[in-house]
Image: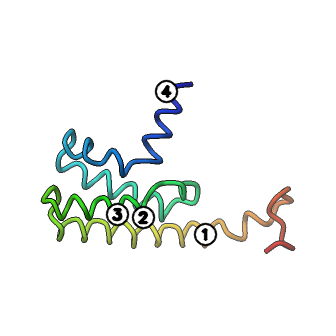
Amino acid sequence: MELIKELFDFVLHLDKYLNDIILQYGTLTYLILFLVIFAETGLVFTPFLPGDSLLFAAGTFAAQGSFNVHILFLILAAAAILGDTANYWIGHYFGLKIFEKNSRFLKKEYL
């Protein structure tokens, strides 16, 4: 149970652990940031990820020289745009299909 609590703390406060991630993973941190921003904007079930605060933290580290600000901008902009596009297509594909079955929480009247 303690491991799960620590995992949730790590994921929810990823911006606080960003320095450790940079030191441990180096340039792979760009990929980690891409995946977090993409998942937050693109996947319906991950809006709890700390995308906004992670952007500010990444900007702070870029100002200190830990990231190349131009590469960081391109990667994070691409992650946000691709995530938003993925979220749109997920909604486009599954949107009305979810309301076809009688669900306890999702009803056509609520739509």
> Along the horizontal axis of the image, is 94 left or right of 89?
right
Residue 100 sits in quarter: bottom right
In the rendered image, residue 58, in percent from the top left (x then y), is placed at 28, 60
Q: Give the labeled residue for mark 2.
A: 52
Query: Which residue corresponds to mark 3?
Result: 55
Mark 4 and mark 3 in contact (Cβ < 8 Å)?
A: no
**In whole angstroms, how far apart are the C-alphas of marks 3 and 4?**
26 Å
Identify the amino acid type marked 4.
Leu
- Taking depth in this image into account, of 52 and 72 the one nearest to the observer is 52
Which mark is first along the chain, 1 or 4? 4
In the image, which is nearer the foreground, mark 4 or mark 1? 4
Q: Earlier in the sequence, mark 3 or mark 4?
A: 4
Is residue 104 toward the left or the right of residue 11 in the image?
A: right
User: Three-letter amino acid code at disc 1?
Assistant: Gly
Disc 2/disc 1 C-alpha distance (Å): 22 Å
Q: Residue at x 50, y 40 (%)?
A: 8
